[in-house]
Image: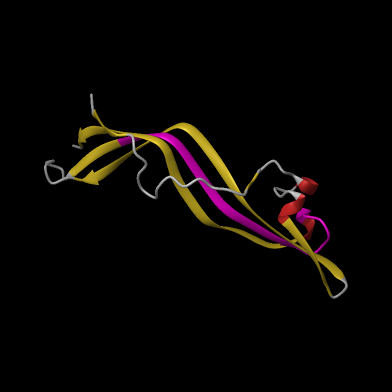
Amino acid sequence: MGKRIGAACVVGGCALVFGVASATAGWAGSRYAHGDCSLSMNGGRPSLFCQARFTTVTPNASVTFGVADETCTSGVRLIRRTGTRVESFLGYDAYNGPVPLSKFNIFGNETDFQDTWRDVVETDLGCSG
């Protein structure tokens, strides 16, 4: 089969994400905890801004990808990465109301996507083609 390359974290490092909000926080049925939101008054009407980092941890994840290798006839060597995949993003929404109900939502987005790995083992699968 293939040979083991190593067990070190690669590509983007192995950063732990702190201050992570749970996707099941659920204040008023939203994805936010009460503490993720700040209330202000806008012309006598309450406005709410919510922001949190959401993280998904997938143990035993696996992905296969190619890397350039001049020793291969095809020029590509296949590598299988196995480990714990940590995907996270920053989500935010604004509401024209006092609680994060979808009917009050005026805008929102997701940004700052991070894809990191922990406890990585990479296996050389040989040249492609």
From the viewer's perspective, is 74 left or right of 78?
left
- Which residue is farthest right? 44
Where's residue 120, x and y in %?
A: 38, 35
Quadrant assignment for the N terminus: top left
Residue bounds of the magenta highlight? 80-102
Q: Is residue 128 above or below residue 3?
A: below
Q: From the image, which quarter does the C terminus lie in? A: top left
Q: Is residue 114 left or right of residue 98?
A: left
Image position of 74 (left or right of 94): left
Q: Is residue 70 above or below residue 126?
A: below
Residue lying at 25% horizontally and 38% vertically, measured from the top left: 78
- Residue at the location (62% across, 49% down)? 19
Where 74 sits versus 43, above or below? above
Residue 116 coordinates in the image, percent (x, y): 44, 45
Please tell me whether residue 121 is drawn above or below residue 66 in the rendered image: above
Residue in the picture at 74% in, 57% down: 37
The percent coordinates of residue 67 (x first, y second) are 24, 45
Which residue is at 61% across, 59% downward? 109
Tell which residue pokes out farthest to the top in this image: 1
Q: Is residue 95 magenta?
A: yes
Is residue 46 within the magenta segment?
no
> Looking at the rendering, which quadrant does residue 75 occupy?
top left
- Residue 5 placement: quadrant: top left
**Magenta stretch: helix, strand or loop mostly:** strand
Would you say 28 lies left or right of 3 here? right
* Residue at the bottom extreme of this rendering: 43
Question: How did the renderer colour the structure?
Answer: secondary structure
